[in-house]
Amino acid sequence: KLFWCVKIEKNKKESEWEMELDIIGLLGACSYALDCVEAELTHVATKHGKRVAYMSVCTAQKMGITGDALQDLAACSLLHDNALTQYIYEEFHNDLTKNNTSKQLGIHCIYGEENLKMYPFLTDVKNVILYHHENADGSGPFGKTWEEIPLFARIIHLCDILDAFCRTPVF
């Protein structure tokens, strides 16, 4: 559990209050809320974020990632589509097969990165959410190549694609 200090001004007196915040509980609540929004907007509850998080953590453990870094990867992968309403709009309300919308796909990445800016990560996860749809050859929404994409974004992208393939009716 992390402790945040909240300052409140009341009647021109400043009081200091300590607030205990259960970060793991917060992540669980956010994940549940994303599942509910997904079910409401798509009429299908897939729990995509949870599956991507599980695969990402398993992949990272095989790579030797542990401790705070593994915990931060779990948080990022669980919330990688935290700008879900924007993502659903992009995916389901636009015909992505007719237009070159790679850049448009990145809009939810921008919002998602911004949404998590104040989350108390224990390691540097800058650009992980932002670049989680980038391809190694630079063909993603932001044109980043392998060397420019953070490792955690690469892991999440791989697991995101794997989850999408495993959910298609062709298989």
Image: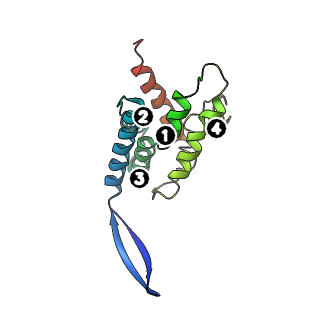
Q: Quadrant of residue 21?
A: bottom left
Mark 1 Cα-neighbour bin, 10 Å: few <14, some 14–19, many ≥20? some
- Amino acid at dot 4: Glu
Q: Return the residue at label 3.
A: 68
Q: Return the residue at label 2.
A: 41
Mark 3 Cα-neighbour bin, 10 Å: few <14, some 14–19, many ≥20? few
Mark 4 residue element: helix
Residue 71 in the image: above or below residue 56: below
Mark 1 and mark 2 in contact? Answer it, CB < 8 Å: yes
Mark 3 and mark 1 in contact? Answer it, CB < 8 Å: no
Question: Which mark, residue 85?
Answer: 1
Q: Quadrant of residue 10?
A: bottom left
Mark 3 residue element: helix
**Mark-to-mark CA distance, 3 and 2:** 34 Å
Mark 1 residue element: helix
Question: Which mark, residue 147?
Answer: 4
Q: Position of residue 18 (x, y in %)?
A: 35, 74
Closer to the observer: label 3 or label 2?
A: 2
